Image (cartoon, coloured by chain):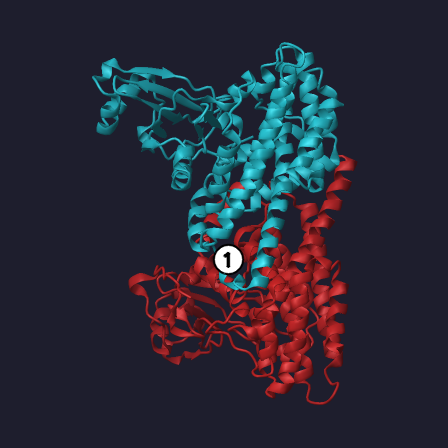
Chain colours: A red, B cyan
Amino acid sequence: MAFKTRFVGGKDYQPLTEHSLRPFLDDLPDLRAGLGGPSAEWTVREVGDGNLNLVFIVKGPAGGFCVKQALPYVRLVGESWPLTLDRAHFEHEALKCQAAVVPHLVPTVHHFDRGRAALVMELLEPHIILRKGLIQGIVYPKIAEDIATFAAHTLFSTSDLAVGASVKKHAMAEFCFNTELCKITEDLVFTDPYQIAELNRWTSPQLDVIAAEFRADAPLKVAVQELKWAFLSRAEALLHGDLHTGSIMVTADDTRVIDPEFAFYGPMGFDIGAVMANFLLAYFAQDGLAVAQGERIAYQGWLLGTLESFWTVFEARFLELWRHRPEGDAFTIKLFTDDAGDRALEAFRHLTMARLLKDSVGFAGAKMVRRILGLAHVEDMEAIKDPDRRSVCERRALRLARELVVDASQINSIAELRVYAEEIRKR
Amino acid sequence: MAFKTRFVGGKDYQPLTEHSLRPFLDDLPDLRAGLGGPSAEWTVREVGDGNLNLVFIVKGPAGGFCVKQALPYVRLVGESWPLTLDRAHFEHEALKCQAAVVPHLVPTVHHFDRGRAALVMELLEPHIILRKGLIQGIVYPKIAEDIATFAAHTLFSTSDLAVGASVKKHAMAEFCFNTELCKITEDLVFTDPYQIAELNRWTSPQLDVIAAEFRADAPLKVAVQELKWAFLSRAEALLHGDLHTGSIMVTADDTRVIDPEFAFYGPMGFDIGAVMANFLLAYFAQDGLAVAQGERIAYQGWLLGTLESFWTVFEARFLELWRHRPEGDAFTIKLFTDDAGDRALEAFRHLTMARLLKDSVGFAGAKMVRRILGLAHVEDMEAIKDPDRRSVCERRALRLARELVVDASQINSIAELRVYAEEIRKR
């Protein structure tokens, strides 16, 4: 894997340290005021546990901020894998688009320094990463609705259904340069799990056989590469690009979607599928996470119910937006003002949703496979320490994932996806 | 219809005249040498008969050139419809991409002046516009193969099957700014023929009823807007964008595709469909163009045979390229090196061609409708002076077109398309 680094940060760039962060913020009056007191009293902590970046929490007498800085390489792998600093710019651009439609579901940006590749954002407290909550078995009553609202508004508002082609294409031109981040997805999601690749890992030897089966599974490889082609060519909307449960921070009554540095114009099903995949991985992981037999059964029901609600609410919101704000160049609304036109368009809206469900299900399958056989795993499974136990959960997830990728077109409703998952768990 | 003009030409720009063209070329040593002799001996003729631009033919003792200059408005409509001069830049960019793969099928560019929005190109003599040849009933034995080769190479080489995502997206970013030209297509092809629009015209009163039917035809409008959504969002390859028989210059043994100023990254079927539509329009027009009863029957057979060959050769060439130069990021070839992989990928290649045929057929229908009920008509039909006779031909074309747009998915082979056209002509 070779990546060309486009070093836009330039001369100002140095990785921030707990030491250098202080004068950086002290020079910015609004931020200094937000923290309060002399900078010597601020506490600074590096807390990044993601795969790519530095993340600092800074607190002062008056308040706190979160500072996220891109590193010129992939943190998970090290300096051997250089990566453009410009991802901070794309994250900032995406956050602006998202804040325009769902400001309550994203962190507020207080400052962006492109030279330093650093974003200063609202400190989300006492939020935790949703994935960690799901591992602990915490119920979040609002989560399905919040993620669905985020997805429906961000995808609709950047699609040809909502904006004129000129506005969309000008925005798209900028995101066409976020190719290094897209390349990570192209390789790690759609390619590497299906070949011998240095960075792949899996629970071994337990999953050696199924990993080899997947690498030899021609229909699976064709189907996953078909999804990759869609990822490469279908510019339907500005995607978050990495919408898993590790990119969502929560409390019982607040949800924020973070980390859109993988944003680009792509197929809407990729974002939806990422959400589905991560709820399904959480579902299969519960059997391994349970301390007492059966203690997570009810929670598994909640997880699948949340998956169902997520899609159902997404579909309803998206349709509502399409009906009431059809201001884009696709489906020019003035062609459909008579009764027959109105009915035909409404039928097509539902057909579009049915197609999007199938797309999403396919992408969900691809995202599940990569989390078990590829480089970047999920803590839901990693937290199951006993490899025998873990591999039972992982194998079930892989079996479902394979069917979703190959047979996505057979899934006609979200209820069918639920039943499918439940059946595979029982086998 | 409102268009924002992006005036890149700037201070240098003046529409060229037969007078001002002479010193412009005289200042360019290579062009001066190519023309030969003193510039006073050059002949300059403005010959533009297209919808948008000025076209000059300049000849000197040693040779000649064609000079194409964009006007800051749509020539067909006038200064009331301003249009970006930058289309000359996009035409130049597209010509470079095409020349990289099919240099023998495009005109050579000798000079590009972005400030003047002027391209100096090889003078194609004794070529004529293919459409004019088809009206005269001239057989071109190589035409199917040449256009098929042009389409296969230009579409394949700019798709994700042939180039890495980074290269493709960087090229795409530039063409994202060719929105004004795309907007013309979005409006004139996919929208205006289906509503009362000032610029629409048709053979009246003969086609008044069918025009009204089309405006009220909800399934047709949904299907055509679905095609528009694909046009807006599916960035499969760099399209010519206006690949009709008026954009092709021919002699008996030479073919050149000109005028790619509508170029952008879009669905491949749009270019293929444009070719199909224009051969089908030529086919239906022959009955009106015939002087003696039945004199064009054999020629109609040649036209449909050419349409069939065009697709057949296109499909074969495209498949050949995909098999032998699969250097893109879609369908990473190293995943398919075993026998099972190879077979599965080959099956998918054929599926892709079947899908592309359906896409193309749909776009062909849309392109036919717009040439009969919209602003820009084709000379094939316009040359039929008797409106009763013309409308018989046009009505047949419209009937086929409507079925192609609504039922494209029913067309499983190019032979079926041929039979469909023949049956509708006999009704």
* The one of B302 and A203 positioned closer to us in this rendering: B302
Q: Is residue B158 visible?
A: no
Query: Where residue B159 sits: x, y (%)?
Result: 49, 48
Residue placed most toward the observer, A162 or B282? B282
Residue at the (48%, 60%) spot, across then down: A182
Q: Position of residue B21 (x, y in %)?
A: 30, 20
Circle 1 packing at 10 Å, graded few (<14), some (14-19), many (20+), is many
Q: Nearer the viewer, residue B368 or B149?
A: B149
Q: Judge whether B23 appears above or below A63 on screen.
A: above
Task: Tell me the subunit letter for badge 1.
Answer: A
Location of residue B274 (image quadrant): top right
Question: What residue appears at the point 75 percent right and 41 percent down from the top-left corner?
Answer: A344
Q: Give the percent coordinates (x, y) of residue A248.
A: 58, 69
Identify the residue at horizontal 73%, vertical 65% (top origin): A417
Per the image, the residue denoted by label 1 is A94
- Is residue A31 something one can see in this rendering? yes
Kindly state the secondary structure of the residue where label 1 is placed. Answer: helix
Query: The N terminus of chain B lies in which quarter of the figure?
Result: top right
Residue A268 sits in quarter: bottom right
Q: Total marks drawn?
A: 1
Point out the image quarter for the C terminus of chain B.
Answer: top right
| Frontmost residue, B106 versus A20 | B106
Residue B305: x %, y % from top left: 60, 29
Amino acid type indicated by mark 1: Ala
Looking at the picture, does residue B117 appear above or below residue B339?
above
